[in-house]
Image: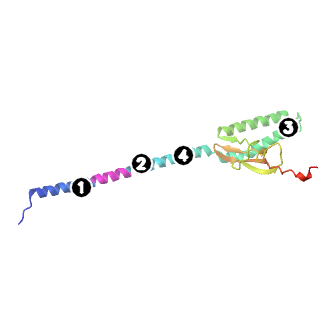
């Protein structure tokens, strides 16, 4: 019968222990990595939920505001008609309409709704809807010459484009007809 030397059993135990420690360290590193990834995923999900909640809060009134824009348009038409009529009849009523319109626009502005400045600006298809082109020598081509219906933004999003008339390129003068 052969006896193993005491050193070989001890050496074997130390080697097994070292392997076990290495395995445990590897598992520990793996678990730490998975924990960090799970924490990062949770943080990303929280940030995304916060962004969605903020967008919902900011744009919750968008549909209501969109539905109210025709009311603003009609109030503006009443005031425009008054300017062309030049009558002192119903001045108190028209003053009330003017005040109502101003309050209405101020209220919408508190919720992030703002009128798009279009007149005299270069035509921008992301903000304007061209309803027609017009010959207008006083403006270079591609400029908004008239606003038919105001456009509105809510924060950084388009609520309704401004409906506009855009100047078009002037046709070249026929050299043969100048005589």
Could you tell which of marks 4 and 2 lies nearer the N-terminus? 2
How far is disc 3 from disc 4 in space, using C-alphas?
46 Å
How far is disc 4 from disc 2 in space, using C-alphas?
18 Å
Q: Which residue is pictured at 51% across the width and 48% down the height?
A: 48
Query: Do labels 4 and 2 touch, CB within 8 Å?
Result: no
Residue holding disc 4: 51
Residue holding disc 2: 39
How far is disc 2 from disc 1 in space, using C-alphas?
28 Å
In the image, which is nearer the foreground, mark 1 or mark 4?
Answer: 1
Q: Nearer the viewer, residue 95 or 158?
A: 158
In the image, which is nearer the foreground, mark 2 or mark 1?
Answer: 1
Residue holding disc 1: 20
Q: Which residue is pictured at 15% across the width and 56% down the height?
A: 11
x and y percentages locating residue 130 in the rendered image: 76, 50
Query: Do labels 3 and 2 touch, CB within 8 Å?
Result: no
The answer to whether residue 17 is above or below residue 152 is below
> Secondary structure beneath disc 2?
helix
């Amino acid at each position: 019968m052969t006896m193993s030397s005491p050193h070989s059993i001890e050496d074997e135990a130390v080697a097994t222990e070292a392997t076990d420690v290495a395995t445990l360290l590897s598992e520990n590193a793996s678990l730490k990595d998975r924990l960090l990834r799970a924490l990062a995923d949770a943080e990303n999900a929280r940030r995304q939920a916060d962004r969605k909640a903020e967008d919902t809060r900011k744009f919750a009134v968008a549909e209501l505001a969109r539905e109210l824009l025709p009311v603003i348009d009609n109030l503006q038409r009443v005031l425009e008609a008054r300017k062309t009529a030049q009558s002192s009849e119903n001045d108190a009523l028209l003053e009330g309409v003017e005040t109502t319109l101003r309050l209405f626009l101020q209220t919408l502005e508190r919720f992030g709704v703002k009128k798009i400045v279009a007149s005299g600006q270069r035509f921008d298809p992301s903000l304007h809807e061209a309803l027609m082109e017009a010959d207008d020598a006083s403006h270079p081509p591609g400029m908004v010459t008239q606003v038919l219906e105001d456009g509105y933004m809510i924060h950084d999003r388009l609520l309704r484009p401004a409906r506009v008339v855009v100047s078009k390129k002037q046709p070249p003068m026929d050299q043969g007809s100048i005589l």
